[in-house]
Image (cartoon, rainbow, N blue to C red):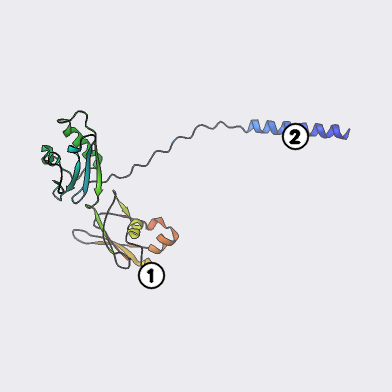
Amino acid sequence: YTNILMVIIAMVLLSGCITTDQSLRVDISPVKPVTEITQDKYILGGDDVISVTTERHPEFTGVVIITRSGRPSFPDKTDPTFMTLPFWKELQLTGISEDRLEQEITEKLKKYLYEPRVTVSIVQYGSKKYYVVGEVLKPGRYAMKGGSTTLMEAIFEAGLPTPYASLRRARIIVPGSKKAISKKVNLYTLIYKGDLKQNLTLEPGDIVYV
């Protein structure tokens, strides 16, 4: 009799678990993909160096140095065909992104080629500069390698602070036409405590003083 009673109790408990699972069943809809954050595009300027590659056409491929006036300059041993293309006199190379310039060159080359495939890439950054001075291992002038640079990226680029640096008294100096603006930043909490509020975005011409 005891064994029969225990079997009955076990069956009741199992049936209760099954009922509970069914009552808690929830339909889960597929997770929607997170929209990718669009980063600021790098805008070309004077002293940048770009590579123009036309697929299957080496004569329309080469390196272009962008002058501060926005005009092209070509390194030695550039293919004459590439260097003397008429549209170089028409293109303004500064103030636009590399993909926009890629589209414009593609349209120009349609006069000479059937469905040209052009790729424009940055070989050397030079137009947007910032400065890191004071107690860092490598003080000097640095080029931004994208649309913007953060304070943390600038400090790492400069080799990190020296042991003599006053990390809590660092400043970002923003030059102005009338008066420079000085912003106090705490590198100690940024580097050692991950305080992202201190990780300010640098603009071209800004000076980080440690």
Q: SS for tag 2?
A: helix
Quadrant of residue 132 within the rendered picture: bottom left
Query: In which quadrant of the rendered image does the N terminus lie?
Result: top right
At horizontal 19% and vertical 42% (from top left) the residue drawn is 62
Nearest the eye: 108 or 17: 108
Q: On the rendered structure, is 21 left or right of 170?
A: right
The residue most toward the right is 1
The residue most toward the bottom is 164
Q: Position of residue 49 (x, y in %)?
A: 21, 48
Under mark 2, the amino acid is: Leu
Q: Position of residue 184 (x, y in %)?
A: 33, 63
Q: Position of residue 154 (x, y in %)?
A: 32, 58
Q: SS for tag 1?
A: loop
Callout 1 environment at 10 Å: few (<14), some (14 to 19), or many (20+)? few
Residue at mark 1: 163
Callout 2 environment at 10 Å: few (<14), some (14 to 19), or many (20+)? few
At horizontal 21% and vertical 49% (from top left) the residue drawn is 48
Under mark 1, the amino acid is: Pro
